[in-house]
Each structure stands twice: as structure tokens, then as C-alpha cells.
Image (cartoon, rainbow, N blue to C red):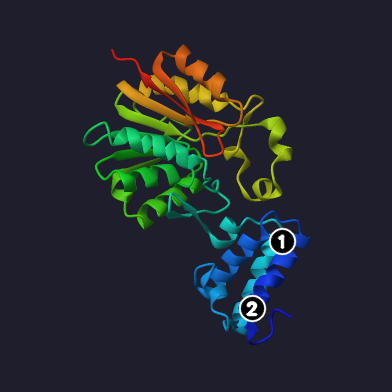
Amino acid sequence: MVTESGLPAREAFRWGIRAMKEAGIKDPTLDAAVLLGHVCGKGPGEILIAGKSTLRPEEAELYVDLIGRRCNREPVSIILGCKEFYSMDMVVNRDVLTPRPETEVLVREADSFLKSCGQNPLVADLGTGSGAVAVTLAVLNESAMFVAVDINRRAVDVARKNARNHKVDDRIIFIVSDMACAIEGGKFDMVVSNPPYIPMDDYGALPPEVRLAEPAHALLAGPLGTEFHHVIIEQGVEMLRPGGVLMVEVGSGQHLEVAELFDLYGYRDVEIVPDLSNMQRVVKGTLLDG
């Protein structure tokens, strides 16, 4: 029994894997290692390397509870209250989307642009959620200033916490607004966004972890999935200075439609950037001068 005093950590680890396998969890080995490491205050691998490591009764009880929550399809990120993104820990909860690895492509492209555009660039992050994109870019670019926007006040509270944790809150202004409605335009060097892009009809096919633990309004766009892209691309024309850049994340199969919208609204040098799985993930373009 996992709650016995002096239970070997490796035995607890194997028990956790078995329990999650029976519950149909996709990657039970990794999840068991992460949760066990959290309980013991160590890295996921450290506790397993030490052959004589044991769990105290209170640690075993906590571990059983966490494994139970995971078996009920609660994501590890929500259980722990944080998620690693771009090698940085971001606070997350049920008010925000958990940052995904594919969004690191958006950050990488945005970071590359910021490092090429001189001192004190001004950036807007529309639909900031946890603030992962704005906060990461602020850490990577010490002279940049940011305006981060979200319609959900509780999401903005999470983003503010992440900004404080990473000591960039003095360079990010947070605004509760429906996209750019509350922002004065014409002055931004870059606008970035990872908007909702799941078509309504696809919601039921999402994993239980997503449907049960992440806010639907931050996932779902509308019948097409590109409704928010239309708004952002149009607003970008008013927000960007001449020569400014807009970058947006897109869902599967949406890249050509979104790239056509960039062309329609007068952006030039439109590019489509794939993620590590070779899915077309980011569309970017430059606002025409003058």
C-alpha cells in the first residue's frame, strides 16, 4: 500500500504508473516522475536515482492524492499550478490556457524580430492569457516595452503574477479589454497573438484534460476557427506603425486562409512558419510603409 511508512520511492513510482495506465493516461511514466518529484521537492529523476529513497507517510498520502487527481484527467500543470515554457516556469490555473510547446515558435520568431529592430520597441500581446508570450519576450528583450491584453480579468491577474515572478512587471502594462478595443493605435513595433482558434464543432474531440480544465472561451473561435484572426489582422493595421510586424499563431490547416487575410489587408513579406512537428503554426507579415 502506497501510504505505508518508509515506502520506497521506486515502488510508489511504479504504483503511480500502473494506476494511470488503468485510467488511460497517455504518458503515465513522465507524469508519475513529475508528481513524485514534486512531492519530494526534487527533480523528477533525482528521487529515482537514489536507490534507498523512501517516502514519509505524509508524502505518500499526498502522492496518492495527486495520482488520483491525474487519473480523473486533471492536467499535471493544473495540479502543480505551473508549466515550463521556454525554460521558464509560468503560473497557470483554470482561468488560463496552459502554455504549449508549439507557442514557443511564436516567441522565437517575435524574439528574432525584436532583436533586429533597435532600442525600446513597443509590443502588444492580444489575448495574453497567462502572459507566457509577453513575459518571456520581456525577459529576453530588456529594452522592450509591452501592452498585454485579455478580456478575462482573472487571466490578467495570472499574467501579472508571472510578470512579477520574472521581474518584468515594470515593463508590461496589463489591460482588460476585448482584443485591441481599449488600445490607442498607430505606435506599436509589433503585435503578437495566440488567439482562440478551435472551431466550435471540434470542441467535443479535444482531450478531457483540455475540456475539463481549460477555459472554453480561450480555445473556441467560432464555426471556422479563424474568426479572431480576422479581427486581429484588421486591428493590426491601426495598431502598427509603418513597417511594424504582426505575428499570429494558427491552428491546423488555417495558415493559407490567414495568410490570404494578411495580403488582403495590405501586409507585405507574409511568411508561414512551421513548428517542430512540421505543422504550419505562425503567420507573420509587415505593415506597408506610409
What is the distance, in whole Å, between disc 1 and disc 2 at their CAs? Answer: 16 Å
Answer above or below: position of 124 versus 70: above
User: Which residue position is annotated with label 2?
Assistant: 60
The numbered mark, 1 or 2, whose residue comes first in the sequence reads 2
Q: Which type of secondary structure does the marked residue at label 2 adopt?
A: helix
**Label number found at residue 30:** none
Please state which amino acid type lies under the numbered disc 2.
Ala
Residue name at image x 59 percent, y 66 percent: 33
Say above or below: 170 vs 59.
above
Query: Within 10 angstroms of label 2, few (less than 14), some, or many (20 or more) residues?
Result: many
Task: Indicate the quadrant containing the C terminus: top left, top right, bottom left or bottom right.
Answer: top left
Residue 20 picture location, percent across and down: 72, 62
Q: What residue do we see at 35% from left, 55% from top? A: 166
Helix, strand or loop under label 1: helix
Question: Where in the figure is residue 253, as x and y percent of width and height?
Answer: 61, 26
Q: Nearer the viewer, residue 114 or 201?
A: 114
Horizontal relation, residue 116 to residue 100: left or right: left
Which residue has dot 1 on it?
71
Kind of residue sitting beneath label 1: Cys
Q: Which quadrant of the rendered structure holds the N terminus?
A: bottom right
